[in-house]
């Protein structure tokens, strides 16, 4: 992973600006990656070969969280899933970049949790209720499967985007925090693994907001550069003139260097 960017922009304004001032990058329009989002609700299909009662982690990962190679990764709040998906579409259309959004490629860990609990987590004394300890145990397995695959996806991506919205980040007196453990984990990975080649939470039903557990995690974005709509418009203009250069290389090498704007919207360093 070479660089991370903090995106603080209105998605609708971003899309409208790109449509009005930028051109689709047709020379980079390869077939968009897509995930094989197939859920088989028979857990027996994911058992280790030769066993009927031992689940195979590789088979579960292949079905629910397959390893994907994309150009960039977006860390976002699950409340902003529509915005993240739209952002991914715009990046593909105007920059030719495949951006990883888990809802595009992966199945729901909530569903996997439910399937496992329905088979393994009922109380021995009363099968109308889940056993709390068993649910804790199954949740640890589901979350570790997801964490392992998130690590692989982020390692495989070249660029990292943090979508900064009121749902994802809390800024109090300059202190950046998040209530999302997944954003905390993903940004922590980026912060620690930036110079290497380097969610959705599980639940059993709706949660009463008044009693929901809330924890705030410190978010480090000191290694990320701010990226706004003007920067991205500039990147599209550069890309249209440099058809043999990747969008990420232009973004890394030139967008944040000093430049002068000329009346005809051309620019130079």
Image (cartoon, rainbow, N blue to C red):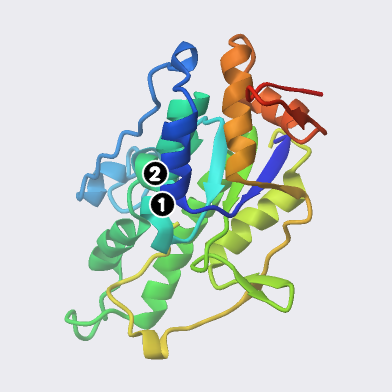
Q: Is residue 143 above or below residue 212?
A: above
Q: Which mark is residue 86?
A: 2
The residue nearer to you, when weighing 210 against 124, is 210
Q: Which mark is residue 144?
A: none
Residue furthest left as drawn = 128
Q: Residue at x 32, y 56 (%)?
A: 112
Q: Residue at x 52, y 68 (%)?
A: 166
Q: Is residue 224 above or below residue 245?
A: below
Q: Is residue 106 left or right of residue 238?
A: left
**Mark 2–mark 1 CB contact (< 8 Å):** yes
Q: Is residue 150 left or right of residue 192?
A: left
Reading the image, the residue beneath label 1 is: 83
Q: Quadrant of the N terminus?
A: top right
> How many numbered marks, from 0 up?
2
Q: Is residue 85 left or right of residue 69?
A: left
Residue 220 point in image, percent of width and height: 73, 61
Q: Is residue 200 visible?
A: no
Disc 2 packing (10 Å; few <14; some 14–19; many ≥20): some
**Inter-mark Cα distance, 2 to 1:** 5 Å
Mark 1, secondary structure of its residue? helix
Residue 224 point in image, percent of width and height: 73, 49
Disc 1 packing (10 Å; few <14; some 14–19; many ≥20): some
Residue 201 point in image, percent of width and height: 42, 64
Q: Is residue 149 above or below residue 176?
A: above
Q: Residue at x 58, y 10 (%)?
A: 243
The residue nearer to you, when weighing 45 against 149, is 149
The residue nearer to you, when weighing 103 against 45, is 103
Q: Is residue 181 left or right of residue 23?
A: right
Q: Which image quarter: residue 73?
A: top right
Q: Is residue 183 above or below residue 204?
A: above
């Amino acid at each position: 992973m070479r660089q991370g960017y903090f995106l603080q922009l209105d998605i609708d304004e971003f899309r409208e600006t790109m449509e009005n001032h930028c051109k689709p990058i047709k020379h980079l329009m390869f077939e968009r990656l897509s995930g094989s989002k197939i859920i088989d609700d028979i857990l027996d299909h994911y058992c280790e070969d030769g066993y009927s009662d031992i689940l195979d982690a590789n088979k579960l990962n292949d079905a629910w969280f397959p390893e994907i190679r994309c150009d960039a990764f977006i860390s976002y709040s699950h409340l902003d899933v529509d915005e993240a998906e739209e952002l991914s579409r715009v990046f593909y259309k105007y920059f030719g970049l495949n951006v990883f959004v888990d809802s595009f490629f992966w199945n729901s860990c909530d569903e996997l949790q439910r399937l496992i609990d329905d088979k393994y987590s009922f109380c021995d004394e009363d099968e109308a209720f889940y056993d709390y300890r068993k649910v804790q145990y199954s949740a640890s397995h589901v979350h570790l499967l997801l964490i392992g695959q998130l690590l692989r996806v982020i390692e495989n991506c070249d660029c990292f985007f943090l979508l900064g919205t009121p749902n994802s980040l809390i800024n109090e007196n300059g202190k950046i925090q998040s209530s999302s453990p997944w954003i905390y984990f993903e940004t922590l990975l980026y912060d620690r693994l930036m110079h290497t080649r380097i969610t959705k939470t599980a639940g059993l039903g709706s949660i009463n907001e008044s009693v929901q557990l809330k924890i705030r995690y410190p978010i480090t974005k000191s290694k990320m550069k701010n990226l706004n709509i003007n920067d991205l418009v500039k990147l599209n203009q550069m890309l249209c003139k440099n058809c043999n250069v990747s969008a990420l290389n232009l973004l890394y090498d030139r967008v944040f260097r000093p430049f002068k704007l000329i009346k005809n919207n051309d620019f130079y360093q």
